[in-house]
Image: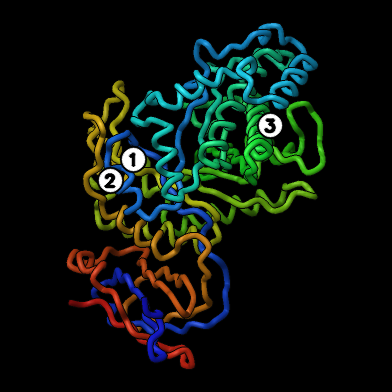
Amino acid sequence: MKSPILHGVLFVTVALLLGPTVRSAELTVSDEVTAKSPGNLAYNFGHYFPGSNTSDWWRYSRASGARIFLSAAHFNVSGTLRPGESFIGTEAGFVNRREALRDDPLNTDYINWPVIEDRFNTPLSGRNRIVPDYALSEIHRLGGTILAQTTVTENAFPIEDEADWYGKWILWRTYYSIAFYLAREFDVERFSSHNEPNHPHSFIEPDSWHMRLQLASDAAQSALEDANALYGKSLEPRFTAPVTAGGGLGSGFDDYGLLALEQIGTNFLGQTPDGHQNFHMYAYQSYNHSPSGFAQRFRDVREEVHAVTPDGIAPLPFAITEFNVHTGARYDDMPESSDTLSKAVRFGGIVSQLAANGMDELYAFKFGLTGWESSSSNNFPVQKNAMLSVDNDNEPYNYGTMNRSGEVYRLFNKGFAPGRELLAHSLSLAAGRMTWIFWLAGTLRAATIIFFPSTKAPRPSLWRSICRRSVFRMAPRSSSKTSASGGGD
């Protein structure tokens, strides 16, 4: 294959969403690397069933990772209780059992591994039809990272009070078994113990939430350490918290984020071992804002987090573990969808703004247009804040087509794959009054330019031509100015 530079000419792929008044743009690019692209451009899972075409669509999407809702309750079933566990009633009994299990984690006297493995091959309940072992093995095979959203609810794991060491043990042992299996089989490093603990539908009091966070985090980190020792791996824990609703502000930070940050170095035993952290990535979820609104909220959250992070803790990276133009509920009240051109353009503005402001990991919600819960009463049969049509009724739940928002994300994922260098640049438009969000990814040897207007949608004819506007010529490296024409048919 020939080099992308031929006879001093730089070939650049350009995807232009141009308004009718914009005719050309002058771009000045330097060799200065100002940042890197986000470390993960991912999706929240939809259906993923054996025999389906999901893997083909996943590869097409160019996503680098996935977030899977893998409820811990799915693995806390009859047969998992082990001999002697019912007598754990003190802190010392908990610690002794923990040490014995970690010394011999494959011993079925401590974990009923046949049952755990069976549960990984049993479809999950809920609106997402997923066989965990199959789905995770496929994402792993395709080179994707995995964030295990493994929630430990109060109903599934009741803990009466701080002295309930039996309840604490059942939670710890269950989480350890899940994390160990995920680490051993799929090299999973990312875990989270709760999803939107401040949301009315999943609310848990901050103190109860934090106790479970400490237990789950210790279990996951212990599991990764033990899997590393047994199998010669070098996995690094990336526990994620607080994963709050509401854009990361308000109660999400005041009641949950602040508590977790103030106690980040304190484990479930009340100890502060050197180098210990209960979590390693700060995460929140956000919808229903403009592109600039997403960016401003991220800057505000980052400022709040950095202001209260204890001394000795390195600045935390950030993840937005769910985001889209609107929630499913908001979309359900309007005729528009993720396939509506203006919404697709807005989605492009959102991902551009988040990346431009330094968001480390992005998890779009979500991959497939799955149905609502059977008890729901909605205007539309599916949640419209997703990217691909899918058969919700018949195995193996095949996917059909990708909508416009999905295509925008695909192009973004292609141009800004994790770890790409972002170059200093300036851009001037020859005409037009729209606000533009501009990014240049790659290096001067292999670059991708994507323009997203933050307000006005392009004409449909321009959208149809987006993938056909491919090779443009730029000036040789010695001259950094170029003119790329676009807009107007």
x, y (%) of residue 465? 21, 69
Which of 442/425 is in front? 442
Report which quarter residue 264 is drawn in.
top right
Per the image, the residue denoted by label 1 is 330
- Which numbered mark, 3 or 1, is in the foreground of this view? 3
From mark 2 to mark 3, how far is it between C-alphas? 37 Å
| N-terminal-most mark, 1 or 2 | 1
Residue under the point 43% across and 89% down: 481
**Left or right of 159, for residue 15:** left
Which of 414/460 is in front? 414
x, y (%) of residue 410? 35, 57
Residue under the point 51% across and 45% down: 247
- Which numbered mark, 1 or 2, is in the foreground of this view? 2
Callout 1: SS: helix
Per the image, the residue denoted by label 3 is 218
Q: Amino acid at mark 3?
A: Asp
Q: Amino acid at mark 1?
A: Arg
x, y (%) of residue 105? 65, 25
Report which quarter residue 16 is drawn in.
bottom left
Does 50 sit above or below residue 61? above
Does 262 sit above or below residue 304? above
**Left or right of 397, for residue 93:** right
Q: Amino acid at mark 2?
A: Leu
Its colouring scheme is rainbow
Per the image, the residue denoted by label 2 is 388
Do residues under tags 2 and 3 come within 8 Å of each other at their CB atoms?
no
